[in-house]
Amino acid sequence: MRIFLSLFLVWAFTGQVAAEQKAPALKAAYSPQKVADGVFVIHGPRGVPSPENQGFMNNPAFVMTTEGVVVIDPGSSVQVGEMVLAQIRRVTDKPVVAVFDTHVHGDHWLGNQAIFEAFPKVKIYAHPKMMERVEQGAGAHWLEVMMDMTRGATAGTRVVSANSPVDEGTVISIGGLDIHVLHDGKSHTDTDIMLHLPARGVIFLGDNAGYGRMLRLNDGSFQGNIRNLNRALATGAKVFVPGHGATAGPEAASEYRDYLQAVYAGVQSYFEQDLSDFEIKPRLLPKLARWKDWADFDSLVGSHISLAYLEVEAAEF
C-alpha cells in the first residue's frame, strides 16, 4: 500500500510539473519603435492569438522617466512580458517602476507576471472594475483562452493583477512625467483607461481603437467608444498609440471612430425601416468598403452589425 501511495504521489507531482512547464520564449524578433521623446512601442502582429505568433498581438509600450521606466500593456503572457523587458534593456538599464493595464482583456496584461517577477515592488495600475473582474475570474478565463488559441505557447503564465486603482481624472506623476488617466464610461469594455502624456504629446488609446485592424465589441458600446475617441482627439495629442495596429497621428483614432459611426448610423437608419440585422448586412457592407482591407474585417463586421442592432434597439426603449 505504501509503495502504491508513493508511486501515486510521484506520478501526481510529475504530472503537475509537466502541466506547469513553461513554454519557450518568443521565436520572432521584435524591436521597439521610438514614437516620441522617450516613448517606445513594440508593435505586435495584427492577427489573433495563434501558435504562430505565440499569443503576441498587442502593442506593448514603455516610457522613460528620470525615476525609471513606465510600461503600458505588457502583453498576453509571461513570454511576451519577458520579451518586453529584453527590449527595454536595449534602451536603458533603469528599473521598471510602474505598469498600466488599459483594460481587462488578457492579451494586454498577462505579461504583468514577467514585470512583477523582475521588479516585485512595481506598482501596477488599472481601473477598479478591471481589478474586480480579474478577482472574479476574468484572469483565469484569459489564461485558458490564450492557452487554447496558442496551443500551449503561453504555458507558465499566471495571473498577476494590478495592485493600484486609477480612474477618471487621476494624474500619476512619475519621475517628472504626469500621466493623465481618462475613463468615460463603457467603451471597448467598461474597464478601459486611456493614458495622456501632455509633455510628450502622446495618448495611449488601449483597445478603444485599432488602426488597420478591427476589434471585438462584445463587451463594449458603440456610442461609448465613439464618445471616448472624440475625447482622445480633443486632447491635442500628436501621437496616438492604438491597442493594435500602427502608431500614427490623430487618424489612428479617427479612422476607427469613423467606422464605428458608419456602422451605428447605418444600422440605426435600417432599423427605422424595420429591417433585421441579417437584412441590414448586405445593404450596409458597400458603405463600409473604406475599411474592407483591415485585418479581421470579414470575420467581425457581421458581429459588429448585430451588436449595433442590439444597442440601437435598446436605445429605443
Image: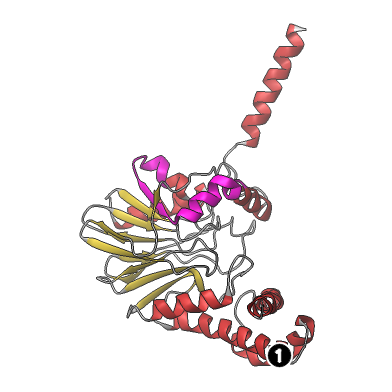
Where does label 1 land, which residue? Answer: 272
Q: Residue at (26%, 63%) from the top-left corner?
A: 178
Magenta segment, principal secondary structure? Answer: helix
| Residue 61 position in % (x across, y down) | 40, 62
Residue 248 visible, this angle: no
**Amino acid on which the number 1 mark rests in the picture:** Glu
In the picture as drawn, the residue positioned furthest to the top comes out as 2
Helix, strand or loop for disc 1: loop
Whether 307 is drawn above or below 160: the answer is below
Residue 168 coordinates in the image, percent (x, y)? 38, 64
Closer-to-camera residue (204/23)? 204
Q: Residue 239 in magenta?
A: no
| 129 in magenta | yes
Point out the residue furthest to the front here: 317
Q: Residue at 43%, 74% (x, y): give it.
A: 247
The quadrant in which residue 52 appears is bottom right
Quadrant location of the N terminus in the rendered image:
top right
* Magenta segment: 115-140
Is residue 199 positioned above or below 28 on the image?
A: below
Work out whether 3 lies above or below 173.
Answer: above
Q: Nearer the viewer, residue 103 or 111?
A: 103
Q: Quadrant of residue 17?
A: top right
